[in-house]
Amino acid sequence: MSNNPRPLDGITVISLEHAIAAPFASRQLADLGARVIKVERPGAGDFARAYDTRVKGEASHFIWTNRSKESLTLDLKHPDALAVLRDLLKNADVLLQNLAPGAAARMGLSWEALREKHPGLIVCDISGYGDNGPYRDKKAYDLLIQSEAGFLSITGTPDTPSKAGNSMADIAAGMYAFTSILSALLLRQKTSEGSHIDVSMLEALGEWMGYPMYYAFEGATPPPRTGASHASIYPYGPFPAGDGGTVMLGLQNEREWKSFCDVVLQNPALATDERFNANAQRNANREALRALIVEAFAKLSTAEVEARLDAAQIANARMNDMAGLWAHPQLKARERWRDVGSPAGAVPALLPPGRNSAFDYRMDAVPRVGEHTEAILRELGRDDASVARLREAKAI
């Protein structure tokens, strides 16, 4: 562990956050060294703490998105709690929030309300649909945005549209909030002024839908739902081996197709079969080709299929489950695991992607609800009597 400075050392982020999108964004800022003060409701805290109890009694989403933060409990409906928040903003660099539409503005925490007193403050708002337009006040959860963005229409099987197994829209919004805040911090170095960032979950996931949108350009037929197979490249997807295992493989060009026929299927004549001699033909005749591949693989074990694919330099992978990912030999070989603290004790966590030679990512504990409330209040100059009054008033 080096003592080298991190990119966001000295940056303070106040985050009025819950669920996934804003916590994921702020955790990544914390990974880079930012001080992140997570404002939670007194008592229960962020409701994502209660999503499940899968990690030694703690919630899986919460453990993933909330390490390296300080937890401050404030009932922002109480004027004294709001005064604490306003004191924090005096020395903050970023205010991040994903409260219900309009909630921050009603508390006087909009960009317009804050910019005069805090000209260097960066305010990032995350919502389902953005701060204007006919959908502005519409409730938006991850699955609903996956549906609105057309993601469900291209995901699943022909008979069953399916959501992504994780929170795709929340993750997309969190990523764009994270990168937008980084760009705003860089811009502030040039202008000495803060800025307002408006991140919409619909627009974030919409960006990731660029390929299927253009595939369906000007009313063209959209990509079909093809399960785990690629919608327009074939063969590209899962195939069963003779021992019951499943191998994922993908071909990208005609050179690979010939090698696949010669080395993997050991059927060189298939390479020039008119039904399969170009990707468009293979895609149009995928059922016939699949039958031939399945027949060839039925005589082989998973390891034997993988060995032939590797020999032919065809991209392939095993279809791992979560246990397989936890135990993945590549992650172990690259020493990507660290233990971080949590309310339930130490838990393993993956280092952030993008190993950097100049610094070590911050990998500190996931906080208990309100764990840092008193320390932060002392930092702001509140004495024993002030803290006691806040507790008595249930403001913290």
Image (cartoon, rainbow, N blue to C red):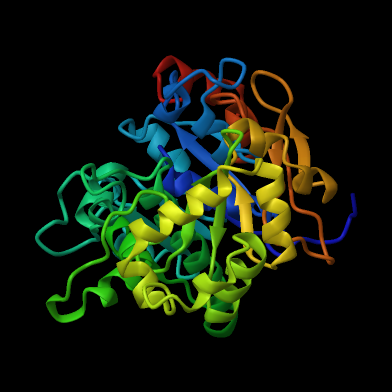
Residue closer to the observer: 298 or 366: 298
What percent of the width, then of the height, locates residue 261? Answer: 58, 68
Residue 210 occupies quadrant: bottom left
Q: Is residue 29 left or right of residue 213?
A: right
What residue is at 13 percent from the left and 64 percent from the top?
A: 133
Residue closest to the far bottom: 190
Please state the total of marks drawn on the protein image.
0
The answer to whether residue 226 is above or below residue 223 is: above
Q: Is residue 135 left or right of residue 199?
A: left
Q: Is residue 150 left or right of residue 366?
A: left
Residue closer to the observer: 209 or 5: 209
Residue 97 at least partly seen? yes
What percent of the width, then of the height, locates residue 304? Answer: 71, 47
Residue 199 at least partly seen? no
Q: Is residue 274 left or right of residue 348?
A: left
The answer to whether residue 144 is above or below residue 387 is: below
What percent of the width, then of the height, locates residue 47? Answer: 40, 27
Residue closer to the observer: 45 or 285: 285
What residue is at 73 percent from the left and 35 percent from the top?
A: 327
What residue is at 56 percent from the left and 15 percent from the top?
A: 57
Residue closest to the far left: 134
The answer to whether residue 351 is above or below residue 308 is: above
What percent of the width, then of the height, locates residue 278? Answer: 42, 79
